[in-house]
Image (cartoon, rainbow, N blue to C red):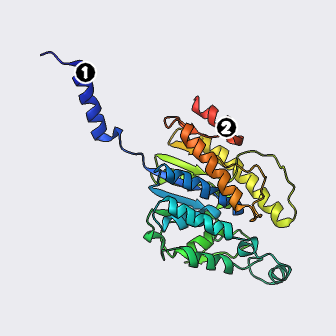
Amino acid sequence: MSVNPARMRALIRGVRGRFGRTRRPRTAFVLSGGASLGALQVGMLRALYERGIVPDLLVGASAGALNAAFVASRPQTVATADELGAIWRGLRREDVFPVGLRALIAGVTSRDDHLVPDHGLRQLARQHLQIDRLEQAVVPLHLVTFDLTNGEEVLLSSGPVIDAVLAAVAIPGLLPSVRWGDRRLVDGGVVNNTPISHAVDLGAERVYVLPTHDGSRALPKLPRGALDAAIHGITLLIASQLRADIARYSSRVELIVLPAPNPRHVLPTDFHHARSLIDDALAATRSFLTTAAVAEPVKELGGGWAPLAEKVATR
């Protein structure tokens, strides 16, 4: 019996389509920490939602945990990104880091494990999160923390959302640790600021990385105080870890590292530039998503990640 080649090819395409070739890969958004530079992620999220790109799970660390918790408690839409942007544009440093002289003296002279209280952050979370527990999230939500007692990373996927968020943003020594059962949890971003590893372990096949740093190691603007210097040092460490993670996981999943433009060299402790950070990230991500080829194993636009992305893509 003769077989029509064209018909056979059509049948093969149909079988492939039915059995997964057209299935959308399980998609994760990984949101890194970066204090005030978390505003960049608002622009990235809006650009993703504009194109109908939505996550099957969200993994966040530090400031990225705040953003992830906000969007996970709402529909994955442009309107949600705009709501988040409005909050960022209204934030001031004292809302997050109330580092006044009185607070510093009280912190230094007390026996507490922190310099400043987390009242502002707690109020922020209580006011804007529309869920009470992590497991109530519209999209499965996972926040990265670190246990000071056992010295190990802890991924929170269930439990009270406000305590989980406060733990995920509790910079050791600066903000108070959070008691979680017999654990004392702090910001997991110190050891895993862009937690690609958890997204992979949770079964993600395509990972959109929303960083807050472009990968460059240059220091265009000197830190102006102890807080600025400490957070900048952490930023350099976590940027190095992200480079290593891109190389480690690019052969296991499809990695899309979004651009994190910061032409004004805004420091992570400067909360006066949220609008420009959002606008710059939105424009850069729109352009990137328009031009990037989805089939490439690593996609990236400019900055310090580019040479690494090219090297991985040619392996």
Q: Amino acid at mark 2?
A: Ala
How much space separates mark 2 and mark 1, taking CA atoms?
42 Å
Outermost residue on the top side: it is 2
Residue 272, by quadrant, is bottom right
Q: Which residue is mark 1?
A: 6
Residue 231, by quadrant, is bottom right
Residue 23 percent coordinates (x, y): 36, 44
User: Can I make out residue 147 in this image?
Assistant: no
**On the rendered structure, is 96 left or right of 204?**
right
Q: Residue at x 46, y 54 (%)?
A: 54
Reply above or below: 100 against 80: below
Judging depth in this view, the residue of 8 and 81 nearest the camera is 81
Helix, strand or loop at label 2? It is helix
Judging depth in this view, the residue of 50 and 176 nearest the camera is 50
Reply above or below: 204 against 295: below
Tell me, for residue 306, which label it has, or none: 2
Quarter of the image containing the C terminus? Answer: top right
Residue 232 percent coordinates (x, y): 78, 57
Q: Residue at x 77, y 63 (%)?
A: 270
Looking at the rendered image, the disc whose residue lies closer to the viewer, 2 or 1, is 1
